[in-house]
Amino acid sequence: MKIIAIGRNYAEHAKELNNPVPTTPVIFMKPDTAVLKDNKPFYHPDFSEDIHHEIEIVLKISKEGKHINEKFAGNYFEEIGLGVDFTARDIQQRHKEKGLPWELAKGFDGSAPISNFIPKANFNDLYNLNFKLDINGEVRQQGNTKDLLFSFERILAFVSRYITLKKGDLIFTGTPEGVGRVNIGDHLEGYIEDVKMLDFYVK
């Protein structure tokens, strides 16, 4: 199982980090050791003083595919969930300044909490999904999939030109604006529409 994540897939998030809005998907990867399941606590690493939350809709790949045609890409995922792409923003910024890869900032252990997955058929419109992240009872991020720069199908078609997708792979599809720092003791709750999908603490 691999985790493929899409950066800057909501225009307002790209702008809040002073990044250009991309014309093709921005791809990075996390190792399977980044996955954090079952609402287990996230342990704040000691190598960063600026861990940011990024709430995202996550697709679970349901069958192997490569060179997927965009019009058929919807056949390659049956379930969606919610995830947090934790990012060591201080490390990322230092690496960006030097033109270095982001892996240390994005792929550290526990940096990808994920919810359970639910059938996409449960939703009337995948491109009108509200999702949000509350921290300590206050809304910190909220987005709607209608604002995606690159659709789920576009993402799968693009990625599969370069990387074969396999059953069980996870695709983090991008975060809306409002990213920010988490602190020890914070309580994170994530929702798709009114369904609570994530509920865990930072320790």
Image: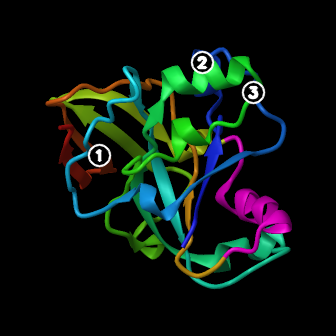
> In the figure, is residue 57 to the left or right of 160?
left
Q: Are marks 1 and 3 in contact (CB under 8 Å)?
A: no
Q: Secondary structure at mark 1?
A: strand
Q: Residue at x 58, y 51 (%)?
A: 173
Q: Secondary structure at mark 2?
A: loop
Amino acid on which disc 2 is placed:
Leu
From this view, report whether residue 12 is shown above or below residue 74: above
- Single out the mark in the foreground, 3 or 2: 2
- Is residue 125 in view? no
The dominant secondary structure in magenta is helix
Observer-nearest of 168 and 41: 41
CB of mark 3 within 8 Å of CB of mark 2?
A: no
Residue drawn at the location 72% of the way across and 57% of the way down: 155
What residue is disc 2 on? 17
Q: Which residues are magenta?
A: 149-165
Q: CA distance from mark 3 to mark 2?
A: 10 Å
Q: Position of residue 29 (x, y in %)?
A: 62, 53
Disc 1 from disc 3: Cα separation: 26 Å
Q: Amino acid at mark 3?
A: Val
The first of marks 1 and 3 along the sequence is 3
Locate the N terminus by quadrant. Answer: bottom right
